[in-house]
Amino acid sequence: MNFMQPFLKYTAPSLAAQKFTAESVALITARSLVIHGKLDRSAPYGAGVDWASMLPNAAVRIPP
């Protein structure tokens, strides 16, 4: 119900402080599933494919 206040206070600043580089992301060894929609308005269509290509154990699924 009151999701946005703690999200904006704690989670958003924590995410903004992260500096993701291709080298740091390549160190992630966990299996990952990237799901990205073609009609997603918050990120360009190719972003999900780009993320999956940087992660060594990732698969990408793009729903119809």
Image (cartoon, rainbow, N blue to C red):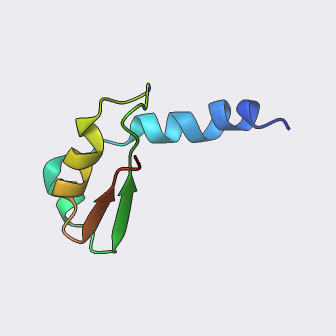
Q: Residue furthest top?
A: 41
Q: Residue at x 44, y 25 (%)?
A: 41
Q: Is residue 30 left or right of residue 14?
A: left
Q: Residue furthest front?
A: 64
**Pick the front one: 29 or 33:** 33
Give the quadrant of residue 37: top left
> Is the residue 12 above or below the residue 55 in the image?
above
Q: Position of residue 3 (x, y in %)?
A: 76, 37
Q: Residue at x 37, y 42 (%)?
A: 18
> Is the residue 30 above or below the residue 62 in the image?
below
Q: Residue at x 22, y 61 (%)?
A: 55
Quarter of the image for the N terminus: give it: top right
Q: Is residue 16 left or right of residue 55?
A: right
Q: Position of residue 22 (x, y in %)?
A: 15, 50
Give the quadrant of residue 16: top left
Q: Is residue 41 left or right of residue 32?
A: right
Q: Residue at x 40, y 46 (%)?
A: 64
Q: Position of residue 40 (x, y in %)?
A: 43, 32
**Pick the front one: 58 or 23:** 58
